Amino acid sequence: MIRGRKSSLIQSFTAVALSGFLLISLLTTAAVVPSGAAPAAVEEGDGPATDVAHNMSSTVSDEEANRTVTQHTTLTLEQNGTVTVTSRLTADPTLTDVAVEVSLQSAEIAPDGIRVVGFDTTTAGAAYSWQPNATQNHSEADQPSLTYTVPKDAVQYRAENHTAFTASHQWHTIDLRADCRNVSLVRNTTIQGSGVVGDRVAYFGPVSTYTRSVDGVEYRLWVPSESADSLSKTPKQTLNLLSSTGGSLGLHNYQDSVSLLAIPAGEVPEEGIGMMWPTEGEGWVRADLPTDTYPSVWAHELAHASQPYQTAADAYWFLEGYAEYYGTTLPASYYNESDRINQSLTRSAGNVILSDPETWPTRKVAYREGSVTVAALNARIKRATNHQKTVVDLNRYIARNHPKGDRLTNQQLVEYVGEVSNSKVENWTREETTSNLSLSKDTRSLSTPQPTPEKQPNNPKQDYSRSPPQDKPLLNQLWQCAARLFGFGGQ
């Protein structure tokens, strides 16, 4: 499952430094998992992590700037299950005036629900301002700050042992306007006590951290003490699967780091199994889910980390179908059990129209029939390009060329297919996604796999233009797994 920047709770703060235009956006929304600077960790280990609490994340917006505005955010889990959020702002004393505008886009936090300290102007819901050059000698308690409470129903938690997992809160996002090159924005977020915190998650309680760096991507696995006995594989084995999956999908083209939090099953809603926010490279998976099932939720969510775009309803099938296809084939190949998954990707598609969710009996159509369609599309792209491109290249092409912020429609997806392959595959995709599915004969008996060129691990993030290059490296293991699945091979 994938989740974008949409949530039920959004709070934004806009700060304007008059000596250079500066925008600070603080979003508080439903969200999940760790980010920022990695704390001390056990590198590729299976033993207990360091005793140091992993309770802080930090982000710097512009390393070359010579003046800073810093946002210090502290999260506190209260006895009643709510989370108190306090954001304290400090600025370079040479900045003469900073204005903060509070815009609440949800009734869950009323303007009078924000406690304001240290601003010269304190009109609720309007602009707050202060003069850094006049407040530099003030005590910390008198520095500008905003405090509010996240409602209890927005947090999954266990009151008896005071641990909490935020299902969907984005604590902050800070953006720097392009014309303000001499001011940097620094975000520091901590939680009271032990735990982990990031743009998309806060977990209160003891957590061990395991990392592995492959192809320029740091994979982080955060394991709460309550989850340690639930993992089906050791942390090292789990990281091996994740890094193998990420390497096959060319994750280095999208992420410098990706983090997954293994959530105790008792702290996740009954229907919840996993989530990923690709913009932040952060996600969570229910800890007791095995890695060697097909599809694997672990691999499925990691695949979403390579999809930094959102879709309209008529293209949702591709978003989930892509992740389900590779969440099935890659783990099966990794564990040398591709023969076990023929049924999972060759089942009857049924009487549905992929681009019309109104015809779906269940949301699972996007996963089930979507993955079958992705498999067939993958084979056709390979045939049309003489095995030079696959659906992985299509996904990368979309990520590089689709306008940021615009939801990908099915029509746009079809056009991208044509640009990556040819008009014949484009027409096939349009027909298959706008009429009743007819895939039963199309997911078998295609060409045998071609050998995979040696992967280039240090290949920089590539800028795919409207004419995608023909010489990109085809990533390891994908040919093998799909070959055994459908007899045609490929990513």
Image (spheres, helix red, strand yellow):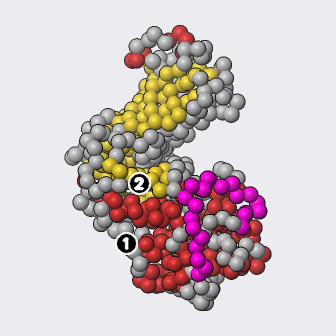
Viewer-proximal residue among 447 and 145: 447
- Residue type of the residue flagged with mark 2: Arg
Reply above or below: 449 against 318.
Answer: below
Q: Quadrant of residue 478?
A: bottom right
Q: Label 2, on which residue?
A: 212
Reply above or below: 349 against 213.
Answer: below
Which tag, 1 or 2, sits closer to the chain's start? 2
Mark 2: which secondary structure?
A: strand
Question: Is any part of residue 198 visible from this angle?
Answer: no
Q: Label 1, on which residue?
A: 292
Task: Indicate left or right for 43 with 129 as reference.
Answer: left
Residue at left 31%, top 54%? 45
Which range is magenta? Answer: 449-470
The quadrant of the picture occupied by the C terminus is bottom right
Magenta: main secondary structure equals loop
Residue at left 25%, top 53%? 47
Which residue in the rendered view is the most extreme toward the front?
454
**Place of residue 239 in the rendered image (x, y in percent of width and height, measured from the top left):** 39, 60
Residue at left 48%, top 65%? 245
Residue at left 39%, top 37%? 56
Reply above or below: 28 against 252.
Answer: above
**Place of residue 419 in the rendered image (x, y in percent of width and height, measured from the top left):** 75, 67
- Residue type of the residue flagged with mark 1: Asp
